[in-house]
Image (cartoon, rainbow, N blue to C red):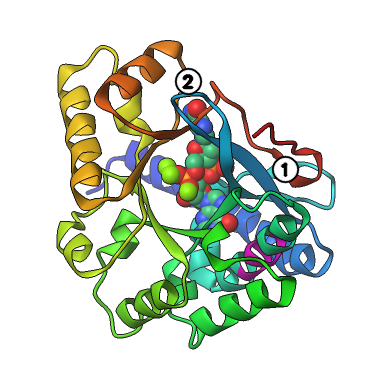
Amino acid sequence: RQAPGRQVRSASFSAAVREQVHRRMALLADLDAALAEDRIEMYLQPQVRLADQNSVGAEALVRWRTREGSLVMPDHFIAVAEHTGAIVQIGQRMVEKAVAHLASWPDPRLRISVNLSLRQLEEPDFAAWVTAQCDAHGVARERLRLEITETAFAVHSEQVGPALAALTEAGFELSIDDFGTGQSSLGRLAEIAVHELKLDRSLVRGIEHDARARRVAGLIVELGRDLGVEVLAEGIETEGQLAVLQQLGCVLGQGWLFGRAEPATQFRLEA
Ligand code: C2E
Ligand code: MG
Ligand code: MG
Ligand code: MG
Protein backbone atom coordinates (compact mmCIF):
# COMPACT_ATOMS: atom_id res chain seq x y z
CA ARG A 1 0.00 0.00 0.00
CA GLN A 2 1.19 3.45 -0.86
CA ALA A 3 1.63 6.02 1.88
CA PRO A 4 -0.70 9.00 1.34
CA GLY A 5 2.21 11.45 1.41
CA ARG A 6 3.74 9.75 -1.57
CA GLN A 7 0.60 10.16 -3.67
CA VAL A 8 0.46 13.86 -2.89
CA ARG A 9 4.08 14.27 -3.91
CA SER A 10 3.65 12.50 -7.23
CA ALA A 11 0.50 14.50 -8.05
CA SER A 12 2.27 17.82 -7.50
CA PHE A 13 5.32 16.50 -9.32
CA SER A 14 3.31 15.77 -12.46
CA ALA A 15 1.62 19.18 -12.22
CA ALA A 16 5.07 20.77 -12.12
CA VAL A 17 6.22 18.72 -15.09
CA ARG A 18 3.06 19.64 -17.00
CA GLU A 19 3.68 23.30 -16.33
CA GLN A 20 7.30 23.01 -17.41
CA VAL A 21 6.35 21.25 -20.64
CA HIS A 22 3.69 23.88 -21.26
CA ARG A 23 6.13 26.75 -20.76
CA ARG A 24 8.68 25.09 -23.01
CA MET A 25 6.12 24.59 -25.78
CA ALA A 26 5.01 28.21 -25.55
CA LEU A 27 8.64 29.28 -25.84
CA LEU A 28 9.22 26.96 -28.79
CA ALA A 29 6.15 28.27 -30.57
CA ASP A 30 7.94 31.64 -30.62
CA LEU A 31 11.16 30.19 -32.04
CA ASP A 32 9.95 29.94 -35.64
CA ALA A 33 8.58 33.46 -35.39
CA ALA A 34 11.90 34.61 -33.92
CA LEU A 35 13.71 33.26 -36.98
CA ALA A 36 11.22 34.87 -39.34
CA GLU A 37 11.29 38.21 -37.51
CA ASP A 38 15.08 38.33 -37.12
CA ARG A 39 14.98 38.03 -33.33
CA ILE A 40 17.83 35.49 -33.32
CA GLU A 41 20.68 37.85 -32.48
CA MET A 42 24.44 37.57 -32.65
CA TYR A 43 26.48 38.75 -29.69
CA LEU A 44 30.27 38.97 -29.90
CA GLN A 45 32.86 38.39 -27.19
CA PRO A 46 36.48 39.41 -27.81
CA GLN A 47 39.26 36.83 -28.07
CA VAL A 48 42.72 38.14 -27.26
CA ARG A 49 46.42 37.32 -27.44
CA LEU A 50 47.37 36.94 -23.78
CA ALA A 51 50.83 38.52 -24.18
CA ASP A 52 49.49 41.98 -25.09
CA GLN A 53 45.72 41.53 -24.74
CA ASN A 54 45.17 42.70 -28.31
CA SER A 55 42.13 41.22 -30.02
CA VAL A 56 42.51 38.47 -32.57
CA GLY A 57 38.76 38.39 -33.20
CA ALA A 58 35.59 37.36 -31.42
CA GLU A 59 33.29 34.44 -30.67
CA ALA A 60 29.72 34.65 -31.95
CA LEU A 61 27.19 33.72 -29.25
CA VAL A 62 23.51 33.36 -30.00
CA ARG A 63 20.77 35.22 -28.09
CA TRP A 64 17.03 34.86 -28.59
CA ARG A 65 15.04 38.08 -28.25
CA THR A 66 11.44 37.32 -27.23
CA ARG A 67 8.52 39.31 -28.59
CA GLU A 68 8.35 41.03 -25.20
CA GLY A 69 11.93 42.16 -25.65
CA SER A 70 13.74 40.01 -23.09
CA LEU A 71 16.81 37.92 -23.93
CA VAL A 72 16.86 34.13 -23.72
CA MET A 73 20.34 32.69 -23.18
CA PRO A 74 21.55 29.67 -25.18
CA ASP A 75 21.58 27.33 -22.20
CA HIS A 76 17.77 27.68 -22.14
CA PHE A 77 17.11 26.74 -25.75
CA ILE A 78 20.06 25.10 -27.54
CA ALA A 79 19.31 21.64 -26.14
CA VAL A 80 15.62 21.89 -27.09
CA ALA A 81 16.50 23.31 -30.51
CA GLU A 82 18.88 20.38 -31.05
CA HIS A 83 16.00 18.07 -30.21
CA THR A 84 13.49 19.67 -32.60
CA GLY A 85 16.04 20.33 -35.33
CA ALA A 86 15.54 24.13 -35.16
CA ILE A 87 19.25 24.37 -34.34
CA VAL A 88 20.02 23.86 -38.04
CA GLN A 89 18.27 27.12 -38.98
CA ILE A 90 19.58 28.97 -35.92
CA GLY A 91 23.10 27.85 -36.74
CA GLN A 92 22.73 28.89 -40.38
CA ARG A 93 21.54 32.31 -39.29
CA MET A 94 24.59 32.67 -37.05
CA VAL A 95 26.97 31.74 -39.88
CA GLU A 96 25.26 34.27 -42.18
CA LYS A 97 25.55 37.01 -39.57
CA ALA A 98 29.17 36.17 -38.77
CA VAL A 99 30.17 36.25 -42.44
CA ALA A 100 28.36 39.54 -43.04
CA HIS A 101 30.10 40.97 -39.97
CA LEU A 102 33.52 39.79 -41.17
CA ALA A 103 32.90 41.49 -44.50
CA SER A 104 32.36 44.76 -42.60
CA TRP A 105 35.70 44.44 -40.71
CA PRO A 106 38.40 45.57 -43.06
CA ASP A 107 41.24 44.11 -40.97
CA PRO A 108 41.97 40.72 -42.58
CA ARG A 109 43.71 39.49 -39.42
CA LEU A 110 40.49 39.43 -37.42
CA ARG A 111 38.32 36.35 -37.29
CA ILE A 112 34.99 35.21 -35.87
CA SER A 113 34.43 31.82 -34.25
CA VAL A 114 30.96 30.32 -34.62
CA ASN A 115 29.59 27.37 -32.67
CA LEU A 116 28.36 24.46 -34.77
CA SER A 117 25.96 21.75 -33.71
CA LEU A 118 26.36 18.13 -34.81
CA ARG A 119 23.00 18.49 -36.55
CA GLN A 120 24.49 21.13 -38.87
CA LEU A 121 27.40 18.88 -39.78
CA GLU A 122 24.93 16.14 -40.64
CA GLU A 123 23.22 18.38 -43.21
CA PRO A 124 24.21 17.27 -46.70
CA ASP A 125 26.62 19.72 -48.38
CA PHE A 126 27.15 21.82 -45.27
CA ALA A 127 30.76 22.56 -46.29
CA ALA A 128 29.66 23.70 -49.74
CA TRP A 129 27.02 25.95 -48.19
CA VAL A 130 29.48 27.67 -45.78
CA THR A 131 31.98 28.06 -48.61
CA ALA A 132 29.33 29.76 -50.76
CA GLN A 133 28.49 32.14 -47.89
CA CYS A 134 32.11 33.28 -47.55
CA ASP A 135 32.70 33.52 -51.29
CA ALA A 136 29.54 35.59 -51.80
CA HIS A 137 30.84 38.18 -49.29
CA GLY A 138 34.47 37.99 -50.37
CA VAL A 139 35.49 36.78 -46.89
CA ALA A 140 38.61 34.60 -46.62
CA ARG A 141 37.59 31.20 -45.28
CA GLU A 142 40.25 31.04 -42.58
CA ARG A 143 38.63 34.08 -40.93
CA LEU A 144 35.55 32.02 -40.07
CA ARG A 145 36.65 29.61 -37.36
CA LEU A 146 34.27 26.73 -36.71
CA GLU A 147 33.84 25.51 -33.13
CA ILE A 148 32.54 22.07 -32.33
CA THR A 149 32.41 20.66 -28.82
CA GLU A 150 34.86 17.96 -27.87
CA THR A 151 31.95 15.54 -27.38
CA ALA A 152 30.64 16.19 -30.91
CA PHE A 153 34.18 15.92 -32.31
CA ALA A 154 34.55 12.47 -30.73
CA VAL A 155 31.44 11.14 -32.52
CA HIS A 156 32.14 8.70 -35.31
CA SER A 157 29.33 8.84 -37.83
CA GLU A 158 28.98 8.45 -41.55
CA GLN A 159 28.36 12.16 -42.09
CA VAL A 160 30.46 13.99 -39.51
CA GLY A 161 33.97 12.77 -40.39
CA PRO A 162 33.61 13.56 -44.11
CA ALA A 163 31.93 16.91 -43.30
CA LEU A 164 34.88 17.96 -41.12
CA ALA A 165 37.34 16.80 -43.77
CA ALA A 166 35.47 18.78 -46.45
CA LEU A 167 35.55 21.91 -44.25
CA THR A 168 39.29 21.74 -43.60
CA GLU A 169 39.97 20.97 -47.27
CA ALA A 170 37.98 24.07 -48.20
CA GLY A 171 40.25 26.13 -45.92
CA PHE A 172 38.13 26.54 -42.80
CA GLU A 173 39.84 26.24 -39.44
CA LEU A 174 38.37 23.99 -36.75
CA SER A 175 38.34 24.68 -33.04
CA ILE A 176 37.52 22.09 -30.40
CA ASP A 177 35.28 23.72 -27.78
CA ASP A 178 35.13 22.87 -24.08
CA PHE A 179 38.30 20.81 -24.49
CA GLY A 180 39.28 18.72 -21.49
CA THR A 181 35.78 17.97 -20.23
CA GLY A 182 34.03 16.02 -22.98
CA GLN A 183 34.33 12.46 -24.06
CA SER A 184 37.99 11.97 -24.92
CA SER A 185 38.70 13.06 -28.47
CA LEU A 186 42.42 12.28 -28.53
CA GLY A 187 41.99 9.59 -31.20
CA ARG A 188 40.18 12.10 -33.40
CA LEU A 189 42.99 14.64 -32.96
CA ALA A 190 45.29 12.09 -34.56
CA GLU A 191 42.98 11.79 -37.57
CA ILE A 192 41.62 15.28 -38.23
CA ALA A 193 43.67 18.47 -38.49
CA VAL A 194 42.34 21.14 -36.14
CA HIS A 195 43.66 24.67 -35.56
CA GLU A 196 42.61 25.37 -32.01
CA LEU A 197 41.77 23.74 -28.68
CA LYS A 198 39.58 25.76 -26.32
CA LEU A 199 40.59 24.98 -22.76
CA ASP A 200 37.30 24.68 -20.89
CA ARG A 201 36.26 27.28 -18.34
CA SER A 202 35.93 24.63 -15.62
CA LEU A 203 39.70 24.02 -15.83
CA VAL A 204 40.50 27.74 -15.94
CA ARG A 205 38.35 28.35 -12.86
CA GLY A 206 40.56 26.25 -10.58
CA ILE A 207 43.88 27.16 -12.11
CA GLU A 208 45.09 29.58 -9.41
CA HIS A 209 44.46 27.50 -6.33
CA ASP A 210 44.14 23.91 -7.50
CA ALA A 211 47.40 22.20 -8.46
CA ARG A 212 45.58 19.42 -10.31
CA ALA A 213 43.58 21.82 -12.49
CA ARG A 214 46.83 23.66 -13.22
CA ARG A 215 48.61 20.46 -14.28
CA VAL A 216 45.77 19.35 -16.53
CA ALA A 217 45.67 22.81 -18.13
CA GLY A 218 49.46 22.70 -18.53
CA LEU A 219 49.20 19.33 -20.24
CA ILE A 220 46.65 20.65 -22.73
CA VAL A 221 48.85 23.67 -23.50
CA GLU A 222 51.76 21.30 -24.08
CA LEU A 223 49.65 19.04 -26.28
CA GLY A 224 48.73 22.07 -28.37
CA ARG A 225 52.37 23.09 -28.68
CA ASP A 226 53.40 19.56 -29.73
CA LEU A 227 50.65 19.35 -32.32
CA GLY A 228 51.16 22.89 -33.59
CA VAL A 229 47.60 23.74 -32.54
CA GLU A 230 46.63 27.03 -30.88
CA VAL A 231 45.24 26.83 -27.35
CA LEU A 232 42.65 29.39 -26.24
CA ALA A 233 41.65 29.49 -22.57
CA GLU A 234 38.00 30.37 -22.01
CA GLY A 235 36.30 32.00 -19.04
CA ILE A 236 39.28 34.04 -17.80
CA GLU A 237 37.90 36.28 -15.04
CA THR A 238 40.89 37.29 -12.90
CA GLU A 239 44.41 38.70 -13.27
CA GLY A 240 45.61 35.70 -11.27
CA GLN A 241 44.20 33.24 -13.81
CA LEU A 242 45.75 35.28 -16.62
CA ALA A 243 49.17 35.19 -14.92
CA VAL A 244 49.09 31.40 -14.46
CA LEU A 245 47.98 30.85 -18.06
CA GLN A 246 50.83 33.05 -19.31
CA GLN A 247 53.25 31.07 -17.15
CA LEU A 248 51.95 27.86 -18.70
CA GLY A 249 52.58 29.29 -22.17
CA CYS A 250 48.95 29.57 -23.25
CA VAL A 251 48.79 32.05 -26.14
CA LEU A 252 45.11 32.99 -26.56
CA GLY A 253 42.22 33.72 -24.21
CA GLN A 254 38.68 34.89 -23.77
CA GLY A 255 36.68 35.91 -20.71
CA TRP A 256 35.08 38.65 -18.67
CA LEU A 257 38.53 40.02 -17.76
CA PHE A 258 38.83 41.19 -21.38
CA GLY A 259 35.20 41.75 -22.27
CA ARG A 260 31.71 40.29 -22.11
CA ALA A 261 29.56 39.29 -25.05
CA GLU A 262 27.92 42.38 -26.56
CA PRO A 263 25.39 42.89 -29.35
CA ALA A 264 27.31 42.67 -32.63
CA THR A 265 25.81 46.01 -33.64
CA GLN A 266 27.59 47.71 -30.70
CA PHE A 267 30.77 45.67 -30.76
CA ARG A 268 34.04 47.55 -31.31
CA LEU A 269 37.47 45.92 -31.48
CA GLU A 270 40.72 47.56 -30.51
CA ALA A 271 43.20 45.39 -32.36
P1 C2E B 1 30.70 28.17 -25.29
O1 C2E B 1 30.79 28.06 -26.76
O2 C2E B 1 31.72 27.43 -24.50
O3 C2E B 1 30.74 29.73 -25.01
C1 C2E B 1 31.30 30.30 -23.87
C2 C2E B 1 30.25 30.66 -22.85
O4 C2E B 1 30.88 31.16 -21.68
C3 C2E B 1 29.31 31.79 -23.28
O5 C2E B 1 28.05 31.57 -22.67
C4 C2E B 1 30.00 33.02 -22.70
O6 C2E B 1 29.13 34.12 -22.54
C5 C2E B 1 30.45 32.47 -21.38
N1 C2E B 1 31.59 33.20 -20.83
C6 C2E B 1 32.55 33.86 -21.53
N2 C2E B 1 33.48 34.38 -20.72
C7 C2E B 1 33.12 34.03 -19.46
C8 C2E B 1 33.69 34.29 -18.16
O7 C2E B 1 34.73 34.93 -18.01
N3 C2E B 1 33.05 33.76 -17.09
C9 C2E B 1 31.89 33.03 -17.22
N4 C2E B 1 31.32 32.57 -16.11
N5 C2E B 1 31.32 32.79 -18.42
C10 C2E B 1 31.93 33.29 -19.53
P2 C2E B 1 26.70 31.66 -23.48
O8 C2E B 1 26.74 32.79 -24.45
O9 C2E B 1 25.59 31.58 -22.48
O10 C2E B 1 26.71 30.32 -24.34
C11 C2E B 1 26.61 29.06 -23.73
C12 C2E B 1 26.87 27.94 -24.69
O11 C2E B 1 25.80 27.86 -25.67
C13 C2E B 1 28.12 28.10 -25.52
O12 C2E B 1 29.24 27.71 -24.78
C14 C2E B 1 27.82 27.19 -26.70
O13 C2E B 1 28.10 25.85 -26.37
C15 C2E B 1 26.33 27.36 -26.87
N6 C2E B 1 26.10 28.30 -27.98
C16 C2E B 1 26.14 29.65 -27.99
N7 C2E B 1 25.86 30.15 -29.22
C17 C2E B 1 25.66 29.07 -30.02
C18 C2E B 1 25.33 28.90 -31.42
O14 C2E B 1 25.20 29.87 -32.21
N8 C2E B 1 25.18 27.62 -31.88
C19 C2E B 1 25.32 26.54 -31.06
N9 C2E B 1 25.17 25.30 -31.58
N10 C2E B 1 25.64 26.65 -29.75
C20 C2E B 1 25.80 27.90 -29.23
MG1 MG C 1 32.12 28.14 -28.18
MG1 MG D 1 33.60 26.99 -24.99
MG1 MG E 1 31.93 26.18 -22.50
In what element is the residue under mark 2? loop
**Location of residue 60 in the rendering, given as x and y in whole percent from the top left corner:** 61, 50
What's the magenta bit mostly, secondary-structure-wise? Answer: helix
Residue at 61%, 27% in the rendered image:
259
Amino acid type shown at disc 1: Leu
Asked whether residue 16 appears in the rendered view, the answer is no
Establish whether ligand 1 lies closer than 8 Å to the Cβ of label 2: yes
Relative to 34, is 228 above or below?
above
**Location of residue 23 in the rendering, given as x and y in whole percent from the top left corner:** 64, 53
Amino acid type shown at disc 2: Glu
Circle number at residue 237: 2
Asked whether residue 187 appears in the rendered view, the answer is yes
Q: Of callouts 2 and 1, which one flags the residue occurring earlier in the amino acid sequence?
A: 1
Residue 93 on the magenta span: yes
Relative to 249, is 176 above or below?
below
Q: Nearer the viewer, mark 2 or mark 1?
A: 2
Q: CA distance from mark 2 to mark 1?
A: 23 Å
Q: Start and end of the magenta stretch?
A: 92-97
**Location of residue 38 in the rendering, given as x and y in whole percent from the top left corner:** 81, 62
Residue at 48%, 68% in the rendered image:
83
Asked if residue 101 lies left or right of residue 144, the reply is: right
